Amino acid sequence: LGVRVFAPATVANVVCGFDVLGFAVNEPGDEVEMRLTETPGVVIKKITGDDGRLPLDAAKNTVSASVQHYLQHINRLDVGVEIELHKKMPIGSGLGSSSASTVAGLFAINKLMGDLLTPKELVPFAMKGEELACGYGHADNVAPAILGGFVLVRSYEPLDVISLPTPAGMYAAIVYPEVDVPTKDARQMIRSKVFLKDAVTQWGNVAGLVSGLFMNDFDLIGRSMKDVLVEPTRSILIPGFEEMRNIAMENGAIGFGISGSGPSVFALTKDEETAKKITKAQQQHLHKININSKAYVSSV
Ligand code: HSE
């Protein structure tokens, strides 16, 4: 018995919501093929598309480790599982690459076990995968990869994940400048203490963004897409960041920022055409400064 599952890339943080906001896109994403075997234990059979960068060791790979964790939880360590992971998106890109693989794996095992858990109940298992990948089990990639659309992680302890509405017609214009920014490093560089004044600005913006999603108010969403805590530090690692922001805003983006921990950037737009125009101009700029890039346009 076997299944093949796709899970999508995600844009975490959504500028002001560090570790608490994220949304899923249609593409890119990863695929997992999984089948049950007679021999107990979880085995990674094959990984494609990763240029040999991901571990085949089942204890170190985020997909197998979270599947193992799931089987332990449902008390089925007698089950044998073979996994093939097909990476179809860049690693270390800020687009929730590890989360897409992990979530595809968890959906696959849950399906093979007869949908014992609800999608929401899979979130903590996927967070274990994030912990393995970058040292901290943040949920702002895995929760939207599992639930789709915009998601708020209201609380981590206890975990409280809320699906938010997505205004009709919204598109994401994503550009990945091909430089490596591992999430682990990008997390270590952030200040752990903040000024109250900055915190006030930040939570005002988070509340504004969430309100804008509920009210279908693109202008309010755009005004709220500001980050005074994390972006000033992380944007330094992203080539052409300010120029890409200018290109996005001059071409009619609702807002612009870093996707996850970078180096990918994203803009939200009111239509597909604007999103395409923005990614094209941003890629042209990156090309001028000798940085290769990939672009994705997706409805949100
Ligand atoms: N919230 C996480 C971070 C997302 O910004 O570090 C990583 O993609």
Image (tube, helix red, strand yellow):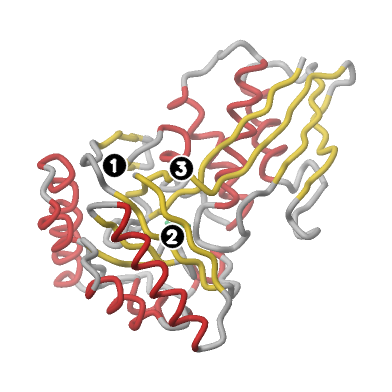
The answer to whether the residue bearing label 2 lies less than 8 angstroms from the nearest atom of ligand 1 is: yes
The residue lying toward the viewer, choosing from 82 and 296, is 296
- Which is nearer the eye, 150 or 233? 150
Q: Are marks 1 and 2 in contact (CB under 8 Å)?
A: no
Residue type, numbered disc 3: Asn
- Relative to 105, residue 39 above or below: above
Label 1: which secondary element: strand
Q: Is residue 144 left or right of residue 21?
A: right
| Left or right relative to 25: residue 65 | right
User: Where ligand 1 lies, by quadrant?
Assistant: bottom left
Q: Residue at x 35, y 54 (%)?
A: 172
Q: Residue at x 56, y 44 (%)?
A: 100
> Seen from this angle, which residue lies furthest bottom?
289
Specify whether tag 3 is near ligand 1 (CB below 8 Å): no
According to the image, label 2 marks what residue? Answer: 260
State whether residue 256 is above or below residue 153: below
Q: Nearer the viewer, mark 1 or mark 2?
A: 2
Q: Tag 3: Cα neighbours inside 10 Å, few (<14), some, or many (≥20)?
A: some
The amino acid marked with disc number 1 is: Arg
Q: Which residue is mark 1?
A: 154
Give the x, y percent position of residue 166.
Answer: 25, 40
Comes first in the chain, label 3 or label 2: 3
The disc placed on residue 26 is: 3
Indicate the quadrant containing the C terminus: top left, top right, bottom left or bottom right. top left
Q: Nearer the viewer, residue 288 or 110?
A: 288
Q: Which mark is residue 141?
A: none
